[in-house]
Amino acid sequence: MTRPDRILLIGGPGYQLQKAKDLGLDVVYCQFEEDFRPEQRPLVDTAILADYTDWDTLRPLVEKAYQERGFTAAVSLTEPGLDPAARVNDLLGLGGTSYEVSHRFTDKWLMRARLAEHTPDGLPRVGAALVTDRDSLTAFGAAHGYPFIVKPVNGTASFGVTRVHDESATETAWRHVQRLRGGSGHPLIDSYDVDRFIMEEYIEGPLYSAESFSFGGRHVVMAVTEAITDKRNHVHVGHAVPGRLTQEDERALVATTTRFLDAMGFRDGPTHTELILGPAGPVICESQNRVGGALLTDMIEAVHGHDPMSMAIGWPMGLVAALPGRPAADGAAASWLITAEEGTVERVEGLDAVHAEPDTLAVDLWVGPGDTVRSFDGQWDGLGHVAVRGPDTDTAVDRCRATLGKLTVRTRPAGTSASSGSSGSAGSSVAE
């Protein structure tokens, strides 16, 4: 017997459990065993501790939990859990996003192929192809020009993205692809199959994202976020809501997003769609059928008055009313990535001072003493985020950078003793 007040949550941040409880829901929680925390136990009705990215493993566990606990919806708010949640929807007939639609988002090549077949008027196409060998890189450059982008078909957080500047760089790009195919060595990318790579035409222009929520096929862009990117490695180090752009450009970004979601066949729930504002107008970069990271949910709630994460949990359970239109902005907010020098964390300084700032919205720090800080090659090599509010976007960004400056993550280089260590300051490796 199904329970209208019980939901299956697959993976994702632990604080989603409290949001589900605040909505009056019981939770069947599927999580990697190593990521399940003792303090989460009181918030969970039933825990499924398994590799949820392995469908052969997950399927019988979900079927058993469904028979015994009777949840009525399956939701994931993390990239590796999106396709598994969609498979559960299909398996149990729960409604929600199907695997076919979800996989168009999680597989960047399928997204490009879908847009090539179903491109509506006003949605520019981007040249794209799969990397097959060294010659495919030079062939793509000859057809679409230089520079162009190479990135994994599956993955997130700017992992493995490289820019091929000219024909002489194709050899380096090919070695980069081969190295990642042989094993990334990154502890946070193990949930992804980094084996296929896509080449995409390079579009010059600033990057924005549309944070949307879809209600039965009606798409509402809740916020347009400005992304501030590190030029060295394409990592999004800063985010600001609302994004700084003209009303005309904002309308174009919103219109492009809704046409894109229609073309993808997406109907219900949150999406985080990245767009480049190119010389000819907005171009879809990529999209995820989930809420955005980098504390964007906290920022959107502070500025636009709605929490996308709670909405994502509550909408399939019939606990959230559809938004009638785009919510107005009240002030602004910004977040910034916390970074430090590579090595072992010795101590964190200034965290209380950051929390004490009246404009601080949220702090998400992932490391503590003894943890490892990797070289800053992707967003997952950051250490968390600090988000602040302000009366306007310029002020919010300035306040965020100033607040971040109060936080220092002291590290020592690998192989050195504590007494001979050096230190790294949060945000020290950022280049705009």
Image: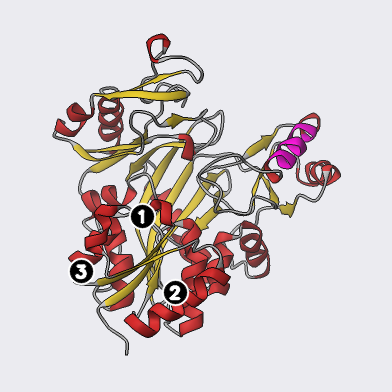
Q: Is residue 97 visible?
A: no
Q: Amino acid at mark 3?
A: Leu
Q: Position of residue 240 (x, y in %)?
A: 34, 41
Count neighbours of disc 1 (C-alpha within 10 A) and say few if under 14, some if 14 to 19, many if 20 or more: some
Nearer to us of marks 2 and 1 is 1
Per the rendering, the mark at residue 36 is 1
Count neighbours of disc 2 (C-alpha within 10 A) and say few if under 14, some if 14 to 19, many if 20 or more: some
- The residue indicated by pointer 2 is 267
Q: Helix, strand or loop at disc 1?
A: loop
Q: Amino acid at mark 2?
A: Arg
The magenta segment: 170-179
Whether residues under marks 1 and 3 lie with C-beta atoms below 8 angstroms apart, the answer is no
Q: Where is 140 relative to 53, above or below?
A: above
Which label's residue is closer to the chain start, 2 or 1?
1
Q: Residue at x 82, y 46 (%)?
A: 133
Q: Is residue 178 left or right of residue 151?
A: right
Q: Amino acid at mark 1?
A: Phe
Q: Quadrant of residue 424?
A: top left
Q: Is residue 260 magenta?
A: no
Which label's residue is closer to the chain start, 2 or 3?
3
Spatial CA distance of label 2 from label 3 is 22 Å
Q: Is residue 178 magenta?
A: yes
Q: Position of residue 15 (x, y in %)?
A: 28, 54
Per the rendering, the mark at residue 23 is 3
Q: Residue at x 42, y 75 (%)?
A: 217
| Secondary structure mainly formed by the magenta segment | helix
Q: Position of residue 229 (x, y in %)?
A: 48, 35
Whether residues under marks 2 and 3 lie with C-beta atoms below 8 angstroms apart, the answer is no
Q: Helix, strand or loop at disc 3?
A: loop
